[in-house]
Amino acid sequence: MLKMEQIVKDFSNCRALDHVNFSMNKGETVAIIGPSGSGKSTLLRCVNCLNRITSGKITLNGKTFVDTPQGGKAQYLSDKELRILCAETGMVFQHFNLFPHMTCLKNICYAPIKVKKESKESAEARGRELLKLVGLESKADVYTAQLSGGQKQRIAIARGLAMNPQIMLFDEPTSALDPEITGEVLSVMKKLSDDHITMVVVTHEMGFAREVADRVIFMDKGKIVEEGAPEEIFQNPKSERLKEFLSSMLK
């Protein structure tokens, strides 16, 4: 489903990703953990071109959309081709980025109607299914300003799913939420994982990574330091850096 090879991402003052190799299969849930500034979110944002890589190669669902000639810089497909490909990814951010002047249902239906040219009837029918999936079917006609943080994030998840993406990307989706309502969002994400939706989740929620992910990746200083099944990562960490990180997170 996704293959990233020798990914380098340089910003003006630092190297955020340092020759990272990462791949995942359809239906897999991968959790990416690590300290702040380790490159987790940057890696995620390179998948849907919110960040453009400096060099490397990325293939999504069998189509390579960026590659790098030897000794050169990364070369992307045309903007039109990228828009089509990026529509195959759904993204959920730390902050919800919902349209405050729209109801929950209209937030979910906006992209399918505008981008995929779906009929209003079809988009709304799918939108109501997704509201039921995230446990908010009664909120269809409610404006997002009237929702709690956890409810807003669940609407954001439904909006991401509305385009029927090949892969869902979650960038620390609970970090802006109060601990009391974090569970309702994680519960929806667990349901998606149980339904074998392909997911990459950048998270500080060690319980979620341990219990839900098929595979856990630990990043530090722009590199993948260690990866494996949750039981390997949490019960038998090999690197000293991962041991230090888990010690600080699991106190």
Image: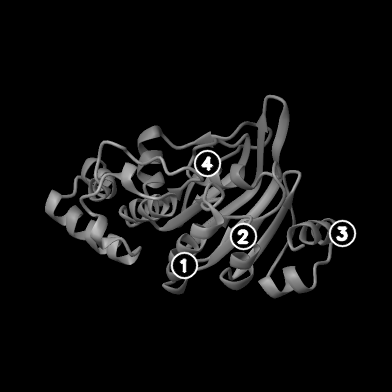
Please tell me whether mark 2 or mark 3 is closer to you in this view. 2
Secondary element at tag 3: helix
- At x 70%, y 41%, the residue is 37
Amino acid type assigned to the residue bearing label 4 in the image: Val
For residue 240, which numbered disc appears in the image? 3
Q: Earlier in the sequence, mark 4 or mark 1?
A: 4
Kindly give the residue lying farthest to the right in the view shown. 240
Residue 101: quadrant of the picture: top left
Distance from the alpha carbon under mark 4 to that under mark 1: 34 Å
Q: Please say if 94 is above or below 29.
A: above
Q: Earlier in the sequence, mark 2 or mark 1?
A: 1
Q: Residues within 10 Å of mark 1 (few under 14, many from 20)?
A: some
Please tell me whether mark 2 or mark 4 is closer to you in this view. 2
For residue 100, which numbered disc appears in the image? none
Q: Position of residue 153 (x, y in %)?
A: 42, 51
**For mark 2, what is the residue?**
205
**For the residues bearing labels 1 and 3, Cβ distance under 8 angstroms:** no
Secondary element at tag 2: loop
Amino acid type assigned to the residue bearing label 2 in the image: Glu
Q: Earlier in the sequence, mark 2 or mark 3?
A: 2
Of 177 and 2, nearer the camera is 177
For residue 187, which numbered disc appears in the image? 1
**For mark 4, what is the residue?**
66
